[in-house]
Amino acid sequence: MVDGVPMSGLVARAADPRAVIVAVHGGATSSTYFECPGHPELSLLRTAAAAGFTTIALDRPGYGASALYADEMADPDRRTALVYGAVDKILADDSPGAGLFLFAHSAGCELALRMVVDPRGADVVGVELAGSGLRYHPDALAIIEEATVTSRPAGLRDLLWQPTELYPPEVLTGALSAPGVGYESEVTANWARRDFPELASRVTVPVEFSVAEYEAVWESDSEAVDAVAALFRSSPAVRVNRMPGSGHNLSVGHTAGEYHARVLSFVDECLADVATNELEAG
């Protein structure tokens, strides 16, 4: 319970954590996205914990246990405070290691970047963003503009889950699906034209931006990806990670194991930078 709101999620603890990874899911799914039930080899939670990282996959505000409070989540500052409060309660007296690393997918990128630039984000060591961008594919835009909380237009599933051979059959059954949340329509409307550029300009930690080979929602050619990287003008490092043989939902496809390994390698680099900076600071 955080500020009177029940918060839920999944946690995989490391005995002596090197850092804490906070994973933020996208729209119309839940924290289960980062567990990929039935496929432990594809689970971010299991893989990261085995590598020495306590990993917290929270249900974003308005999802999971907080779904009954979704109408109270329009304020982004409130959403950010709830997630930080949940992380604090989960960790309690446990060591956070070297700090927090934010791992975000799709609509979760908005919340993750708000967490990074928030004053409570002083211990954030880096951030991974995937399934996002600045410009929608023209065909995708027409479909997304028709979507509402209660109605998913024809073609939306194909945007998110094609080619189907990139995913285990069980993933395509809808087992990872959850009802959307009302405030997300405003998040979607303002993301590319306003919030993504504004938030990215304030990020001062290393950033990895991952792009699936078969990304169908966002334009992902070199020009489009370079434009995203250029937003992070205050970041000390921006790395682009192109994932072959992958679709929009990177963490639950057949290549999720390789994807998570690459992200954890980036986390290692972030921790090495933290250690170097601490030595130089004396």
Image (cartoon, rainbow, N blue to C red):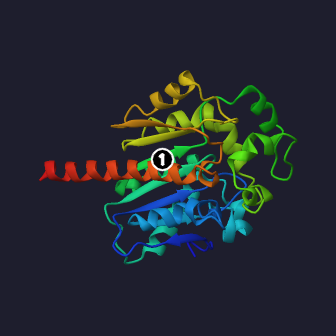
Q: Is residue 280 visible?
A: yes
Q: Position of residue 173 (x, y in %)?
A: 80, 59
Residue at x-position 38% and y-position 66%: 52
Q: Position of residue 79 (x, y in %)?
A: 58, 58
Q: Is 34 above or below relative to 3?
A: above
Horizontal arrangement in the rendering, residue 141 relative to residue 19 (left or right): right
Residue 232, image quadrant? top left
Question: Residue 78 or 162: which is nearer the viewer?
Answer: 162
Residue at x-position 35% and y-position 57%: 123
Residue to which mark 1 is pinned? 128
Q: Position of residue 99 (x, y in %)?
A: 35, 60
Quadrant where the N terminus sits is bottom right
Horizontal arrangement in the rendering, residue 108 relative to residue 70 (left or right): left
Question: Residue 224 or 93: which is nearer the viewer?
Answer: 224
Residue lying at the far top in this picture: please name it: 223
Q: Is 32 above or below relative to 77?
A: below
Q: Is residue 54 visible?
A: no
Residue lying at the far left in this picture: please name it: 282
Q: Position of residue 9 (x, y in %)?
A: 59, 69
Residue at x-position 73% and y-position 55%: 28
Q: Is 94 above or below relative to 121?
A: below
Question: Residue 60 or 51: which is nearer the viewer?
Answer: 51
Name the element at disc 1: strand
Q: Residues within 10 Å of mark 1 (few under 14, many from 20)?
A: many
Give the tally of numbered discs.
Answer: 1
Q: Is 135 above or below relative to 269?
A: above
Residue type at the position of mark 1: Glu
